[in-house]
Image (spheres, grey):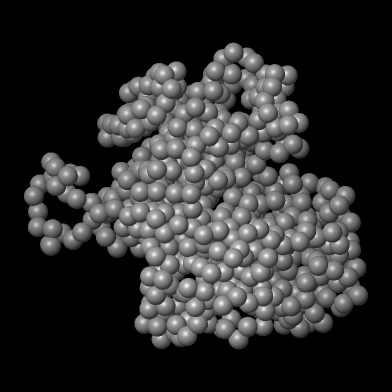
Amino acid sequence: MKASLSRVKKLRELMQKQGIDLYVMENNDPHESEYLPDHWKEIEWLSGFRGEVATVLITQEEALLWTDSRFFISGEQQLKGSPFKLMKMKVAGVPTVAEWLDEYKAQHDTNCTGGDCRILFNNKVDMDVNLISRIWKDRPALPMNEIELYPEELSGEKTADRIHRVLEAVEEQGGKGLWLSALDEIAWVLNLRGTDIACTPIFISYLYLSNKGSMLFVHEEKLTDEVRTYLSNFNITIRPYEEAAESPYRSMVGFNPIPLMKGIKNAVEIEGYCSAMLKDGIALTRFYHWLENQLKAGEEFCIKDDGTFGIGGEITEMNLVQRLIDFRREQPLYRDESFPAIVAWNEHAAMPHYEPSRDHDTPITGDGLLLIDTGGQYLDGTTDITRTIGIGKVSRAMKRDYTLVLKGHIRLARAVFPRGTRGDQLDVLARIDLWRDGKTYRHGTSHGVGHYLGVHEGPESVRMEHNPQVLCDGMVFSNEPAIYLGGKYGIRHENLVLVRPFDVATDAPDATPCDPTEQGEFQCLDTLTLCYIDTSCVIKNLLDKDELAWLNQYNKRVFDTLAPHLAEDDRTWLEEKCKAL
């Protein structure tokens, strides 16, 4: 990490010249994006840390980086040899950023408020100074890719109606307009998409919405004549992206109805998810069949310089990332991955957000567990799926943990709950069996998923931390309990689920009749993802009869749905994989 050492040294020299005691950095951009264009990857450039969540504090004596449990193991590896000390969030004995700053203030008699300041400049808060820009001489430019129209037949709502619905809600709360900086919100409300951010079809811009006239702040090179004409239909004028910084409308950031509106999918969007899941299921079946054949045959594959496969190397994590992309590309409407693929063999899977790279790649040899967490961006929907499969001899301990994680997945998938339930009220369903073994996982159980937008979105979630958002019909989110044992293995089972009304007559025909007006309304979850769950690692007697029935019925549905779309050899293979336990 010589580069990190040199860059931190230059930063400290500049801090000293400017009279700056402390420099604070968040791993984000002006739009609070999850995935950043290279232009805004300041923390990665400075430290070498590639995780999405990070806060950095630099003084003349210390360089500290806070991140959450998903990046503990990979963070230690990426920061090795750098001047940074990893600060593990929510671990006993590790202060939070705010606590560390409070202690720093007490010792240095400064007036910095909590973690809100960016730097201390002669003991005064200054939010506008960006020292990284002064030392990052070859900083990449912002992307200038063209913006694309997103068809209303795929979004399920006319753009004029969507804008009207948003502004009506804002005005009901006393607002006169709405300033938007979140890129997925801008893309959603305008029925536009882009390619500025890897894995997420959005474009860099700001938007001000008002019934008196709206403004899109964007680099004009990104606008085709078709998009310009389209925007003029909604009384939206184009302003230079740089003008957004000084716009008087930036203060219009009050009530924002878009996250909830975007989170509740309409009938067309839900149909799109189902279509995307079918395509994804076909690609995944072909991929896993191909992988099993290669492992059985003992053939060694490599990626050639031209990106194609050939004999002469090993089947590695990186090879599998590319091969899965190839299978997905053969499906109609496929555009991109929905996030950088996680293909993790044995101990690598103990890192929740491990990403194989040329520097960290492992051949798939011997015995153990292979965790593959991937997703696709299709024009009609976004997918996100994790499967853990056994290869060779799988230990009894691995099988036990595999089954306990699966029990949690099934408990949540089968959940029925009163309307008005929050995600944090359901989280225990996914964890209880792991808790009984003295194990847990530190990330959330669920995140919302956008419709041909970000693979991670809100406002709903299922996690231990309180989230006041209730679950609404039409929400689509992940179901992904897990277990991670450092240096050994990781297991995660993930499907996407849809919230819908629970109909007692059809969903529980054996239930004792009751007065629904007295008992209230209920909701349940439909599993959308279509990919077999490997039963070779399941300890059958750890499942109760309802859990076993769910597993067998799910695999049967996967086969029945995908079989008509598969070649005979893939169909025969999948039928064997989906046999009932």
* Image quarter of residue 373: top right
x then y, percent, for residue 400: 45, 30
Residue 165 visible in this rendered orientation of the protein: yes
* Image quarter of residue 260: bottom left
At horizontal 55% and vertical 64% (from top left) the residue drawn is 226
Residue 197, relative to residue 412: is it above or below? below
Q: In the image, 193: left or right of 559? A: right
At horizontal 80% and vertical 66% (from top left) the residue drawn is 132
x then y, percent, for residue 62: 81, 62
Camera-side residue: 23 or 198?
198
* Image quarter of residue 468: bottom left
Camera-side residue: 408 or 133?
133
Q: In the image, 420: left or right of 230? A: left
x then y, percent, for residue 351: 61, 42
At horizontal 55% and vertical 28% (from top left) the residue drawn is 369
At horizontal 41% and vertical 71% (from top left) the residue drawn is 160
Residue 219, relative to residue 143: is it above or below? below
Residue 207, relative to residue 560: is it above or below? below
x then y, percent, for residue 502: 23, 51
